[in-house]
Every structure is written in C-alpha cells, then in structure tokens.
Amino acid sequence: MGEELSGAAGFLEVVYREICTEYAETIYSLQEKNVTDSEALLRQFSEFPEATFKQYLNTEAPVLRKNKNRSNQLRESGNKAYSQKNNASALKLYTDAIRFAPYHLIDDDTSAGYGEELALAFANRSVVLVQLKNYEAALSDIDLAFMAQYPQNLRYKLYERKGRCLQALKQDKLAEEAFNSCLSGIRESTLTEEKKQKLETEIKALIKNLSPSDDKKGKEPEKRKIPQLKRKNKNFPAFSDSVSIQYKESQGRFGVAVRDIPLGELVCLEEPPCFYLHEEMTGVNCSNCFRRHEAPLPSPICTQNVFCSLECQKTGMSGYHLVESKFMDVLFQNGLKKKEWFLALRAVTNKPLEFFTSLQHKLDHQPKYGLEKDDFVYNTEDFLTLYNLVSHTEQWDQKEHAYKAFFALFFVRCLQKSEYFGEKQSCDNKLGPEELMIGKLLIHLMEVATMNSHEIGQLECFGEETSWLLGTTKAVGCALEPTLVLLNHSCDPSLIRLNFGTSTFCFASRFIKKGEEITDSYTLTYDVTPKLERLSTLSKKYKFECNCLACKEEWNTYQLLPKSFNDLVDNQLKLTAQNAGSLGGRVQAIQQLGAKIHRVQQNKDYSGALQIYPDFLKALDGVISPPHQFYVIARRSYSTCLWVLYGNCLRIN
C-alpha cells in the first residue's frame, strides 16, 4: 500500500487508511490468505461503509457550476482588461465567462448552444481575437454568438466585425455579404438616426473598396501536412507493411522488419480508442483531441472541460463526457498517483453498459490475440484488442491487487452517481451483477493501462524567437494504442514517437535492417537515465528485466559518452588497413554534414534538415559504432524536426 499511496494527496488515501485501520483484522486476513481474486476483493471492500464515498460523491461544488452571475462578472473583468489593452488577460477572462455561461443546446443534432451570457461572451472574445489578428477564430466566435441568439438590435456590430475579418482574409465576396447584413442590422438597431447615417456611410465606403469579382475564396488557412502510411499492413493496418507481428513465449507479441527500413520512414500511425487528458491540462487543452486552442469552446454541461471545435465538443458529448461530467467535481480530488488508471474509466465511459453485457462472454484473455488466423484484421477500434493486451496480473502482489480493487470500487461508485447502470443499479452498498462485472473489467483495464499506456505530449517553446530545437516535450495526457504497444521495449529504441492531437506517429530513428526487431521505449532512454534506474522502473512497473544492447553493454548516459573522435573507447573506431588512409577525409565529411544540418535548422528549414540526416548517419556509421554523443544529438534533433513538422507544438509567450 505504501508505494501506491506515496505522493498521493487526495481523499482516497484518507479513506483507504481508515479502512485498513478500522478493519485491520479483515485486511490482514485477506493478506494471509493471499486473496487476489478481483470479485472477492470488490465484494469485501463494498461491505465497508467508508467505501461508499458518499461524503465525497454527494458533495456539490457550486463554484464549478454554470452560473450567469459569475459569467457576467468574468465578462466585465474582461472588458476592463481589454480597455487597459491587456489582450492576454481579456482573452482568458472572456473564455472563462464562456465556460461559466448557462448553456442550452440548440437541438439534439448539434452541441452548439444558446443563452444571453454565452452570446455576449462569444461576441466580446471575438473583439480580442481581431486585435490579435486571429481572424479565423474571431469568425468562429462571431458565428457562435449568432447561434447563441445575440441580441437582434446589436447584431450590426457582429456583421461589421465579420466583414472586416473576411476583408483581412481577402474574402471580399463574403465580406460584402456581411457588410450588407450590417446595413440591414443598422436599420433595426436602436441607434439614433444621426449615428445610423454615420455608420451606414462608413460601411458603404468599406464595400466600395472591396473587389468581390476578384475573390477566389481568399487565402485559405495553412493546413499542416499530416503524414500517412504509404502501404498498410493487411493484418495490422496501424503498422506499415514493413512490420511483421510475431509471437514467442519468452517475448509475447513483437514486431520484426520484413524489409530494410530507412531512417525517417513512418512505421506506425494509430489513433487511440482510449485517451485521457491530465488533470492539470483540463480547461486548457481540448478534452477530446488534446490540442491547445486560443479560443476554446466550453463544455455544455460543466465548467472544467473545454473543446477546440464543435466537432470535438460533439464527440465528447456523444459519449464519455456525458457520463464523466456528473462526477467531475470529485474525480481529480482523489490523489491518484497512477494517472494511467483513468484510462480504465474512460474505456468504460466510452461505451454504454449494454455493450459490455453483450460482450462479457468474449472477455477471456488471449495473449496471442490477432495471430490465430491469417486473415484476421487487428482493428484498433475493436475493444477486444484493448482487452487482450498484456496485464501481468499474476505478477502483482496481494497488496497491489487490494488497492486496485479499492480504486476500481471508487470508479464504480462514480459510475453509480452518473446513473451509468440505469435500472441495473443496486439499491444498497453491495454490488449487483452488472456492477461487479464492470468492477472486474476496470481492474483488468487498470492492469492493462499500467503495462501499456503511452504519454501524449506537446512540444513547448518559450518566446517567439527561441529555436524549436531548445523546446521540450511535455506530457498532457495518456492513451492506450493497442497496435503500437505490441512492440517490445529497448533502452535504445529504433522508433521516434510523436503526437498530433491524440494520434501517435512512429518514425524509424535509424536504419533498421530486414529481420531486426522493431522496438519502442517504455521509459527514459539509456542516454537520459542510468541503467540501474531504468531496470528498477522496468521491473517494478512493467514486470520484466531489460536485456537490450544498451543494458547488456552498459552504455553510459549522454554526459559520460565520447564527445569527439579523440576520446573513443576500445574497438569503437571502425579502422581497418584498407580504410585507414581515408579516415581523415571521412571524419571531415561528417563534420561538414553536421555543420550543414546546423545551418539549415537555424534557418528553420526543418524539412530540409531531415533530408541531410540519412547522409550524416551513414557517414557516422562508416567511422564509429554507438554509443556516442553524435548519435544522441542526431536522434534528439531529428526527433525535434519531426515534432515541429508533424506534432503538437506550442509557443508560450
């Protein structure tokens, strides 16, 4: 119990310690009998009155509820900040006003909403966005203000703003339509006749300066080029056809290259079926795609979550968010150290109860899942691909099993609060058949998440002029990718992982030979963390001992590696009688290529830099063997170039 609770600061630590103290004899008996069966543990914990969590689940947090007075106060504070030309503060305050504004759904087919406070907050935020020259976001807010039933007598303001945004985007035809709507709105406004005439004259002058006949849809916003797999694996479509998935008792399922794979080839692209945004990023990044947006949309039903678009908002509202929002107040107060366990909850809230009751006869763990039939297609969206990931349940000790059951019971109580079980919900503290089924499923998925989850990250860089090469990746959430996690671990992985939204892209980090195992890294790589620390983490969390080359040969961390051609260790220099005479020229070629990469990256031509790296590594491989600082620097900077081009990136000013 100690390790699970170390660092925890929430109420679950308190409750668990109370139970262990109050019912010490029962807890000790479970340990003595080595009770690890999930159902038995769930039944036992459900009998403890403290494990209803009622005092926490029934506590309301009005400060986190939609509140028109709070929304109005935030909007007024935003107005004050805007008048003081503090656009950053105004933008945040208007966004908070939007989050707290009462939200009434327009209809069942859309997640868009209406309400007086909502409309006014969207309209005010659009003003700041215009000042920041984010015209696309301003246009979105203007349209949302219209949908939210912005006052009819003030709509001319929005039409004028819309016209100016479209004009700035060189969409003159649409700008003309907006300005004409503005003229109609002016006539319906409560302005004095003098003010009406003055404003009409200004708008007509704007229309006169337009060239709608030359409008060719204007300038489209730049869209990032997202790489795609050129040829997919027919059985594992999230992998390219360069990968073969095999099975050995000692290795489980693992990936092997069926052909030579060059540096930078996209090997895996997977959109996870299960993901969860970290607590500290909630209300900042989109809860559905994890991307940061300058002008996010609110949750229609709570104040904690935001979305980057109506599409993401609708996706959340059609599934997990409807369930989770009913216990969001307490969900992040529990003090859970294992953030990946939230993935187990999300895997359940993604689906209705009926989905699991109809599937329970298939919930028999199969370690070779996906390899039994030659024509079987391993589908990421198939829940069974998630369920059949390795869990190492037999290697968890009794105390760990007990704590998992306790925490799974808390999740079940949360689901009860949201009425997830409907008429199947039990009337007392004991769990009914459906609740026990979900509880056992949660325990299994918590084990799966512990062994298989990946972080979802974003590359962050401080300051407009700072090079992306000085940026750092920050975890914003976690996900389960049922295909990617089939790859085994190496402390010197052959792949580079990055994220765009919640999707994961894996590129070859070096030349991978046909027949070589393709590896990922489950923890920090050899150049960052000493061997003993890596082995300790891998043993405690992932239940295995690493025997990769970096571990067997005890490669040093970056600072202790050779840093030039003059401090190489024995046999690291690839020197023969035949190539000795050309060594100086080859070393010079490496230095020239390295300098060229540096120049290209300084000019922010990251795509151009990627084209040079294969020649650099080929030249390096011809002279020395890893490990060496040159290899580490190349992998790190190559990875950063990929993140800048294809990943989640955020500049923080």
Image (tube, grey):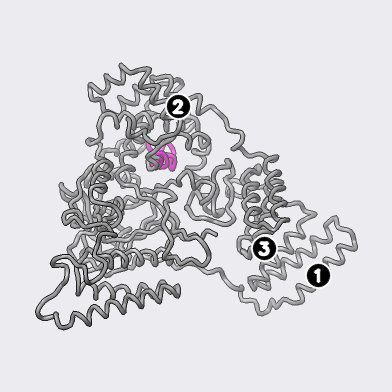
In this view, 133 is above or below 83:
below
Point out the tag, 3 or 1, that comes first from the N-terminus: 3
Residue under label 1, please give it: 202
Callout 3, which amino acid? Gln
Alpha carbons under labels 2 and 1: distance apart = 64 Å
Give residue 622's mark.
none
What residue is pinned by disc 3? 131
10 Å crowding of disc 3: few (<14), some (14-19), many (20+): few
Dot 3: element: helix
| Bounds of the magenta segment | 342-356
User: Crowdedness of circle 1 by 10 Å Cα count: few (<14), some, many (20+)?
Assistant: few
Report the Cα–Cα distance between label 3 and label 1.
20 Å
The Cα atoms of the two marked residues, 3 and 2, are separated by 53 Å
Comparing labels 3 and 2, the label whose residue is closer to the camera: 3
Q: Name the residue type under label 2.
A: Gln
Query: Badge 2, how many Cα within 10 Å: few under 14, some, many 20+?
Result: some
Residue 619: say if magenta.
no
Query: Which of the pair 227/262 is nearer the observer?
Result: 262
Q: Earlier in the sequence, mark 2 or mark 1?
A: 1
Q: Position of residue 616 (x, y in %)?
A: 28, 74
